[in-house]
Amino acid sequence: MTPAVIAQIEPIATPEIEWFAVSPLLVLVGGALVLLTAAALARSRPPRGFYALFTVVTAALAVACSALLWQRVTDPGRGPFTAIGGAITIDGFSVFFAVTITAAIALGALLADDYLRREGLDGPELYVLMLLSGTGGVVMAMANDLIVVFLGLETLSIALYVMAGLHLRRLESQESAIKYFVLGSFSSAFLLYGIALVYGATGSTNFGAIAGFLSGNVLASNGLLLAGFALLLVGLGFKVAAVPFHVWTPDVYQGAPTPVTAFMASASKAAGFAALLRVFVSTFDVYRLDWRPLMWGLAVLSLLVGSFLAVVQSDVKRMLAYSSISHAGFILVGAEAASDRGIAGALFYLLAYTFMVVGSFGVATLVGGRGDADHGLSAYRGLSRRRPLLALAFTVLLLAQAGVPLTSGFLAKFYVIGAAVEADSYALALIAMLSAVVAAFVYLRITVAMYMGDETEGAEAVTRPAVRVPPGAALALGVAVAFTIVVGILPSPVVDFARDAVPVLLSAP
Amino acid sequence: MLSAVWLIPALPLAGFLILLAAGRKLGEPAAGWLATAMVTGSFVAGLVTFAGLLGEDEHHRQFVFTVFEWLPSGSFSVDVGFLVDPLSMAMVLFVTGVGALIHLYSIGYMHGDPRFHTFFLYLNLFAFSMLMLVLGDNLLITFLGWEGVGACSYLLVSFWFERNSAAVAGKKAFVTNRVGDWGFMVAIFLTFASLGTLTYAGEEGFLENAGALPEATALGIALLLFVGAAGKSAQLPLYVWLPDAMEGPTPVSALIHAATMVTAGVYLMARVNPLLDAAPAALTVISVMGAATALFAATCAVAQRDIKKVLAYSTVSQLGYMFLAIGVGAYVAAIFHMITHAFFKALLFLGAGSVIHGLHDEQDMRRMGGLRKLMPITAGTFIVGWLAIAGIPPFSGFWSKDEILAAAWDSNRLLWLVGVITALLTAYYMSRQVFLVFFGPPRWQEAHAGATSEEALAEPEHEPAAAQAAPATPHESPPTMTVPLVVLAVLAAGGGLLNLPGVLTLEHFLEPVFEDRLHELDIPAGILLSLAAVTGVGVVIGILAARAIYLRSTQPADRFEPELLRRAWGFDQALAGFFGGPGRAFANFTSRVLDGRGIDGAVNGIATLVRGGGSRLRLTQTGYVRNYALFMGGGAVLLLAFFLLRTGVA
Amino acid sequence: MLVNQFLVLGAVLFSIGVYGVLARRNGVLVLMSIELILNAVNINLVALGALQGASGAVTGQVFALFVITIAAAEVGVGLAIVLLIYRNRASVDLDEVDLMKG
């Protein structure tokens, strides 16, 4: 073709793409692709820790882009906006989750660095998958359209399936991958069916259009719509590990490589809640009377089942998995309130939880030792004597999960329960507090094992290989602990961040 | 001078941080001295603040020192701040004062322990938490301290975690306190929901506005707070953890389980007195529970053989007195008794610790006796403590107990009668203890000879190796231990001066806190005197009974014959008849059966329920993907069914 | 044709797929059952899209294309995982994969 021919072609209407709006996504995807390509082309192995460093730098760039976006959306003159033909919304909510998920990526990469070398799995794959998976999570949070939610969810999940099975030779890791895959795709099929039904009932997949339709029309027979709600809740409930869609959680968390578990428990749950909050609390607001009882049921079941089952476990990763189910219950308490305060509480909880859970699984990564198999409670006995600082860090994180005052965990629980009380959900608030009491036993058990480990086990302790604390993981743990304590004492910046991040409903232009 | 208040909690916190960073390097005894200096420093800071408070006008003695805004939350915010008023200062002074003495004592007591510095680290953390509890200017800060002291108590009770019983006791303390904490938490949220604030003081504060609450709400909050207080202050039915907590080192029992932490519940009740005023029914509940606990624990104390267990039940009983006082509106009497009790009970515990120390970790009173010649300082000070708790004038316990009983008389005669009977029992069991330990023939030598064959009722406190060492002659303890004993003895003897009409009146000082809610006694002087006389007669009967049983029955000639032990038991049986209902048999019944299976069972029952429920639920987690998918499918069907039924109904 | 006919067909396919996931032990067959569910969704999407057709939007049809693409990616990963299991166990029976439970 000659240039003249090209010049003759008529211009067509394409949606205007505001590149700035998607800059965090571009940075993450771009980083992943560059890393993959560079690793494939490089002749020699890169210096130790290069991949992790690259990932952290990419994450930092993404956070910087998010900060710029934040400035724009909080600027009263400009405010939130939609981009790419109304497919995504850029508001405080999107930016909040972009930051949360990116933080999980950075911390996960730091944990993975030494882990991969220790297990003989070194390579760029995990980092690339983590960046891509995180991108999917951010897409879910930015989505302004059910199709985009689904795309984000699948990007997040497919990468996670692979990550779960990354420890190729460990049977548990394979098992974790297949279980996660089968149940994950099963649940996203439900989600998809739900989307189709909602689309059928409202005639649109765009959030703004759906909300406009729902508030403007009274449906004579809303069976299609409500069935859609139910199926959407199945898919999203699976992602956030809410009972009864939690069954995969303990097995997958236990079997997956521990840094992957850390990422999964933080980023994937955050993304799931981002979609849940935006779809139900924000978009289906008109139908709150219909879905609130369901949210109530899921919250109660998650709170109770999570904490009760955590008590009877003997594997620390499994305990943390069940406790993450109970945390999901707490966040659902915030969602159930269906108010701005509830959402802000849930967001605060998610950010605090991200650091707590990454830190906790980070400790498990180190204690697990070579082979990533040493996760029984007995591995933690006497840890305070072998690694006092590590034990102290873990204690802080566990206390925060238990909701002890002056940690971020306490405030997180305080805000969601406060929102529930304000929304007159007294029973739910009571149950939440009750489950906090029960769950405290779990954290206590681990703490006790670390500090009161039997001296008589000295013989075994000698044979146990020393727990190594590599610098990358130490940094990640330090950040997690520092965040937990500092936010526990001076929460105002994070509280303001969460309060300004309540989702905004925008129609396509 | 008032702004020195921040130093009060800051110093122990600094001590804790220093010990955390460099405790191992400091080692023994520097770590102990550092911790002691920090608590002493905070006592001095307390004195300075106190002086500042006295300088203010009498009715404006309320000062809030805000450190920083903690929780912003829309229109409502919670600060980290300290409330300086007569009530908190009275608490601060005795907590830091007694605390400093116990820190000093611990230097001697913990000598040679491999985790010496850790012990002081916990002690300083405890002091910090307790001061936050007392000084906090809102319910959340109080709760923060509340959790903190609970955690420290747990850590310190199971300090010698190598011993299984210590670990179990720590766990029990934890479980019971969680029940109480739950009540506290719910109360906080209820307060917040109904008043929109958690701050005590000020126009907007919740104490100012508590009167405006509907009575049902006020009652709910008050009762929930009482559940919390009952957990922390070991009231029926949540007292079970306290006797077991004696597994901890003795200075811990003195500091936490006698003088300070267990009084937190009483403090909380006094702090929220306007709320209680708005819910009279709550006051009734509190007074009845307090009286019941006082009597119940006193009967249990009668049956104990472990020197520390007697004191533990006695503490529960005395705390019951304080709640009784709160319940009848005698707030000042409650605080007064709390302070004198801190003096004499800390003294008694430390004395008991000195005895245990001198006898190389012997805790069974049947293997003591005649120690007053060998341990003159310990014995002398212990006797002062005994006279104080028994209520012999002019020792401190007499004044405070008398005030409570007078207030009880004015409110309800039955409560008064229970109080008097408890006073009698108190005199009896404390005399029994003194006679068994310090008087009569020495039984420790033979006991050591036959220690291995005899039933080991009390486990040795330190390492087992120490207990098996050759029986040495009991010796007086080192000065670091005896100096605090002497100081506390002076306080226990003269503590009554704090509220002696016309001298230094605590009542006058505390009045602005309670205002017109304070119960005014309306009893003629003559009746007051006769009431005191009746109590006095009861006390004398108690002491004489103990003397008859424990000094006469153990004649030197037949000491340590098993038949003699049995005969002593026989006396106890006769005693049961003498006392009628609440006698030895009942005491045995309550302390063994009820304590052992009933209430304990409830605590264990909760744990069993959780475990059992967890184990059942576990069965759903089969490990098969197909079953998981079925589970999720079932969940989906449930959700769909919910909506379909909903639309069907609509 | 009536839109309900398509919806019923979709529901039937969906149910068959769910049954397959619940009842089949063979990993590959489970994957195929999941594909069946996704195709049931596609039928729904296209039918419902046609129902909205008057307004000119083709959201449903486009969405179906997305679903097909993603299903392909998903099944690729799924087969790889099944293959991994097969290599280690010489079996694709999912009921044998039960190391972790409780």
Image (cartoon, coloured by chain):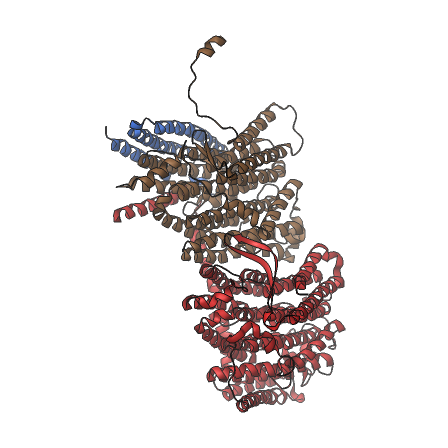
Chain colours: A brown, B red, C blue
Pick the residue in front: A363 or A277: A277
Q: Position of residue B270 (x, y in %)?
A: 54, 71
Q: Position of residue B341 (x, y in %)?
A: 61, 76
**Apparent side of residue B163 relative to residue B360 in the rendered image (left or right):** left
Q: Check the image and name the residue furthest to the left.
A: C1
**Apparent side of residue B20 relative to residue B208 in the rendered image (left or right):** right
Residue A60 lies, with reference to residue B87, above or below; the image says above
The quarter of the displayed image where residue B307 is located: bottom right
Pick the residue in front: B365 or A105: A105
Q: Quadrant of the N terminus of chain B?
A: bottom right
Residue depicted at x 42% and y 21%: A13
Q: Position of residue A241 (x, y in %)?
A: 45, 45
The quarter of the displayed image where residue B338 is located: bottom right
**Apparent side of residue B244 relative to residue B616 in the rendered image (left or right):** right
Residue C72 lies, with reference to residue A475, above or below; the image says above
Q: Is residue B308 visible?
A: yes
Residue depicted at x 66% and y 52%: A388
Q: Is residue B459 visible?
A: no
Q: Position of residue B164 (x, y in %)?
A: 59, 63
Residue A90 lies, with reference to residue B607, above or below; the image says above
